[in-house]
Image (tube, rainbow, N blue to C red):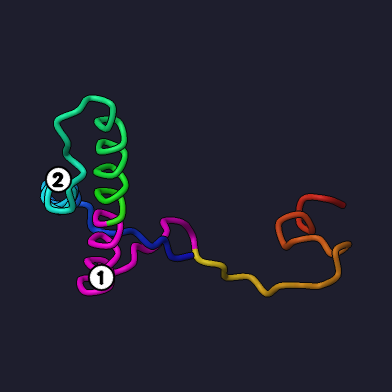
Amino acid sequence: MVWFTYDSRYSPAIWAVSFAVANIVAFSLGFYEASLDKYPMSVFIVLCITYFLGFLANFLLGLLIPRPPNQAIGEPFTSAGSLNLTDKSETDKKTNP
């Protein structure tokens, strides 16, 4: 079994840059107004842009710089399989008379 993971070393930096870029985009689009009644909407817009840019950047980073898969730890499957569910394994055959 293979477990796939992603490289999370750059994730905090990606989210910080995404937040900064989201603030710049929101300011340039005019969402920062002087009135306090539009402040919650500007915060919502900044958070939406931050999540979009952060997920997009992490996705692209995972595509461009993939990590090798980690192999699951355990014993390999060495015995022959059987479709007959009433068959006993080799250890059960030896212990039961």
Above or below, 42 against 30 in this view is: above
**Quarter residue 81 falls in:** bottom right
Percent across and percent down for residue 74 are: 46, 56
Number of other residues with Cα within 10 Å of mark 1, as a class: few under 14, some 14 to 19, many 20 or more: few
Residues at marks 1 and 2, CA–CA distance in whole angstroms: 29 Å
Q: Could you classify mark 2 by the number of other residues whose Cα lies within 10 Å: few (under 14), some (14-19), or many (20 or more)?
A: many
Residue at 72% over, 62% down: 90
Look at label 2 and name its amino acid: Asn
Would residue 83 appear left or right of 45 to someone viewing this image?
right
Element type where label 2 sits in the image = helix
Q: Nearer the viewer, mark 1 or mark 2?
A: 2
Query: At 32% from the left edge and 47% from the top edge, which residue is drawn?
Result: 48
Residues shaded magenta = 53-75
Circle 1 residue: 66
Residue 64 x, y percent position in the rendering: 21, 74
Does the CB distance between marks 1 and 2 fall below 8 Å?
no
Q: Nearer the viewer, residue 50 or 16?
A: 50
Q: Can the viewer see residue 9?
A: no
Which residue is denoted by mark 2 in the rendering?
Answer: 23
Q: Earlier in the sequence, mark 1 or mark 2?
A: 2
Q: Is residue 81 above or below residue 93?
A: below
